[in-house]
Image: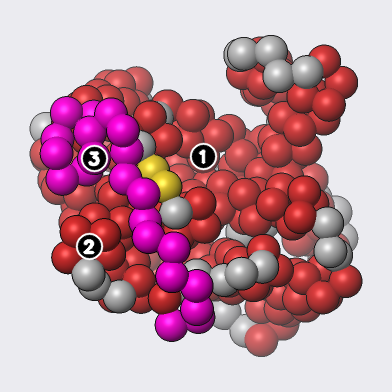
Amino acid sequence: MTARDTLPILGFLVVAVLVSLFVTSNVVLNFLVFTLILAIAAQGWNLLGGYGGQYSFGHAAFFGMGAYVSAILQQRFGVNAYPAAAFGIAAAALLGYAIGAMVFRAGLRGSYFALVTLAFAEVLRILANATEITGGAAGLLISLNLGAGNLQFANRSSFLILGAVLLALAMLITLALEKSRIGAQLVAVRENEAAAAALGVDILAVKLRAISLSAALTGAAGALYAQYFLYIDSNIAFGTWISVEALLAPIIGGAGTVFGPLIGALILQGLSEGTKMLIGKIPGVDLIIFGTLLILVVRFPLHRIPGVIAALWRGKGAP
């Protein structure tokens, strides 16, 4: 990874800072913050699904773990928000490793892997809904205590910068992985597991590293969500909505690319908000739009767009 490779990420940060300085509309800022949270979760899915070819339908498990651990430590045990968020991210990574150890050792992949991850997320949703420490069905409200030391800000602009920094870090991690030996092994596993194993790649170890890092990034998105809204419940934290959107964003924007999740998140949220403005808040209409978009993407792949942009940036021309 060279300094030139990181310039687009730096450019994204500069744009985010400029937006935070000049945009004053809370509606626009809220849209952008939520989009960044989704993009971070999608970047986590992208590491496992885009680069590793392991399509998960249950990334809500990691998102919810990061959100709940962070919120519980703050509200129930008085832990400061910063270490609470760190513990939330670590808990999500451990959960990812545990699920991976069980699923990958059993040799599950493809649709079987997707369904098992979906089942884990649903089990956690039910447990969170019935457990006292999580607030049960009523959810958990984090006490308002404004101040940078508590990771609570009075304006959305500060959260926009925080979200942009976290997403930039996620992008740098993805870029570093892409350029590393482990990244090459992960792509080899995606393309042909048998051939990768024949070349000496430790398939299980590569998959466990990928799912742990993927879970950590998605857990970071969950912790940021809890800190931004100061409230979570089981349907928010472990709901299928985040699994669906974390999966769709990279696929639409370009799976296996650094900027794909951000592009996809902008498209998804733009469509969602635009639909609500045009036809009102009809329940499920956004899912209809997302489903239609997914069909179009499968039929007419959009992953070529980020690829062309990346090739032009490297000066090699369009593929």
Q: Amino acid at mark 1?
A: Ala
Task: Examine the rendered structure and indicate whether residue 84 appears above or below residue 205.
Answer: below
Display coloring: secondary structure
| 148 horizontally vs 286: left or right | left
Q: Residue 312's x, y, as percent?
A: 85, 63
Q: Is residue 148 magenta?
A: yes
Identify which residue is drawn at 14% across, 35% down: 131
Secondary structure at numbered mark 2: helix
Q: Residues within 10 Å of mark 2 (few under 14, many from 20)?
A: some
Q: Earlier in the sequence, mark 3 or mark 1?
A: 3
Which residue position holds label 3?
A: 135
Kindly identify the amino acid type of the residue bearing the numbered disc 3: Gly
Q: CA distance from mark 1 to mark 2?
A: 25 Å
Query: Quarter of the image holding residue 16?
Result: bottom right
Residue 29 left/right relative to 146: right
Q: Nearer the viewer, mark 2 or mark 3?
A: 3
Taking the image as drawn, is residue 65 in sight?
yes
Q: Are marks 2 and 3 in contact (CB under 8 Å)?
A: no
**Where does label 2 land, which residue?**
73
Q: Nearer the viewer, residue 243 or 206?
A: 243
Task: Report the disc number at residue 174.
Answer: none
How far apart in space, not on screen, are marks 2 and 3 (Cα)?
13 Å
The disc, 1 or 2, on the residue closer to the chain's N-terminal end is: 2
Give the class, few, some or many, for how many residues have Cα within 10 Å of label 3's Cα (few <14, many ≥20). Answer: some
| Disc 1: which residue | 246
Question: Of tags 1 and 2, which is closer to the observer?
Answer: 2
Up the image or down, 262 lies above or below 168; here it is: above
**Segment tinted magenta in the rendering:** 129-149
Residue at coordinates 83% horizontally, 26% vertically from top-left?
277
User: 264 or 31: nearer the eye?
Assistant: 31
| Residue 119 image offset from top left, x and y in percent | 25, 24
The three-letter amino acid code for the residue at tag 2 is Leu
